[in-house]
């Protein structure tokens, strides 16, 4: 498949604005992102590159956040081979995450096999790692779990392996839901329903645990729905944002929704936070 590389140079603005832009670009069909010293690179199948939509998106960025871009057509290559070369297995607590081409390590209590495709969530990003550590400490036996922004399905799969009765995994990106379904089969787990959509796709049922690893603005927009479906005494775990203002805004929003902030953890300035519904 022919890919195009778009190099984005960001001037001014905050880190969260870049994250929101990346999220918007994913909705335009960009499927891989790489940080640079001046911004980031984004990759998209050349046939899916819509410069008019890209220009429209950049036109409506916040004042003070200026973004320039350059488009480069890439020589055809075996992208699966590239992903395999760059995917390294890792251990998070008592969970070992590997790809199909890595040897298993039976000494770990839990093993998750993830095919390294374009979808987000292999455990390597700080937010995924933080959420996995929280899950490994949580009693999920017999509980219903909601996983918002499921990506590869790694958190949903771990929840199932930890004894969750039912897991609903939701993502707006078809690439992610397709990847999640494939990884569920790879791991031989059951009881996971994968749905493409956003907060409107959340079923009207109660969950004992809600996971949402997305970004600050989407979390703020969707938190009321999380609270609606979270049972009293249930746990809400949020990640995908930074320490400081992001966390403060989420804590303020939680107070209006019968959610008590309990604690948070940081890794390289990324944050995961725990809330309990009262």
Image (cartoon, rainbow, N blue to C red):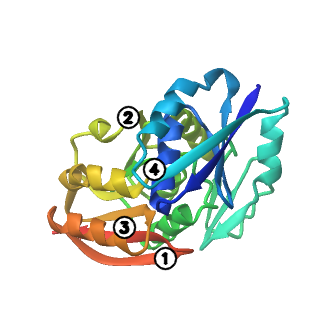
Of residues 178 and 54, the one drawn nearer to the viewer in this rendering: 54
Q: Name the quadrant of the N terminus.
A: top right
The vertical placement of 59 against 272, above or below, is above
Q: Which mark is residue 266?
A: 1
Tell whether label 1 touches label 3 (CB within 8 Å): no
Which is in the foreground here, disc 2 or disc 3? Answer: 3
- Residue 87, position in %: x, y? 75, 54
Tell whether label 2 touches label 4 (CB within 8 Å): no
Which residue carries the number 4 mark? 20
Q: Earlier in the sequence, mark 2 or mark 3?
A: 2
Quote the CA–CA distance across marks 4 and 2: 18 Å
Residue at 43% x, 63% y is 239
Q: Quadrant of residue 220?
A: bottom left
Tell whether label 2 touches label 1 (CB within 8 Å): no
The secondary element bearing badge 1 is classed as strand
- Residue 271, position in %: x, y? 45, 70
Q: Earlier in the sequence, mark 4 or mark 2?
A: 4
Tell whether label 3 touches label 2 (CB within 8 Å): no
Callout 2 environment at 10 Å: few (<14), some (14 to 19), or many (20+)? some
Of residues 205 and 82, the one drawn nearer to the viewer in this rendering: 82
Which is in the foreground here, disc 1 or disc 2? Answer: 1
Is residue 118 shown left or right of residue 204? right
Q: Earlier in the sequence, mark 1 or mark 4?
A: 4
Q: Which mark is residue 13?
A: none
Q: Earlier in the sequence, mark 1 or mark 2?
A: 2
């Amino acid at each position: 498949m022919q890919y195009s590389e778009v190099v984005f140079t960001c001037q001014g603005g905050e880190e969260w604005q870049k994250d929101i832009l990346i999220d918007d670009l994913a909705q335009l069909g960009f499927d891989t992102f790489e940080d640079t010293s001046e911004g980031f690179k984004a990759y998209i199948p050349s046939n899916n590159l819509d410069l008019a939509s890209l220009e429209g998106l950049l036109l409506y960025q916040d004042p003070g956040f200026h973004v320039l871009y350059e488009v480069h057509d890439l020589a055809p290559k075996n992208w699966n081979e590239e992903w395999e070369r760059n995917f390294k297995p890792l251990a998070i607590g008592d969970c070992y995450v590997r790809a199909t081409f890595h040897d298993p390590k039976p000494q770990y209590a839990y093993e998750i096999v993830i095919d390294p495709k374009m979808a987000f969530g292999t455990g390597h990003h700080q937010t995924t790692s933080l959420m996995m550590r929280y899950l490994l400490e949580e009693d999920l036996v017999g509980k219903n779990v909601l996983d918002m922004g499921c990506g590869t399905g790694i958190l949903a799969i771990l929840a199932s392996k930890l004894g969750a009765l039912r897991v609903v995994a939701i993502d707006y990106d078809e690439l992610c839901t397709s990847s999640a379904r494939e990884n569920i089969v790879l791991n031989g787990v059951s009881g996971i329903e994968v749905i493409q959509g956003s907060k409107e796709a959340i079923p009207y049922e109660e969950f004992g645990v809600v996971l949402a690893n997305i970004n600050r603005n989407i979390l703020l927009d969707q938190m009321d729905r999380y609270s609606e479906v979270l049972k009293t005494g249930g746990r809400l775990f949020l990640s995908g944002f930074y320490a400081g203002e992001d966390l403060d805004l989420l804590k303020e929003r939680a107070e209006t929704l019968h959610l008590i902030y309990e604690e948070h953890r940081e890794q390289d300035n990324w944050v995961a936070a725990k809330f309990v519904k009262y």
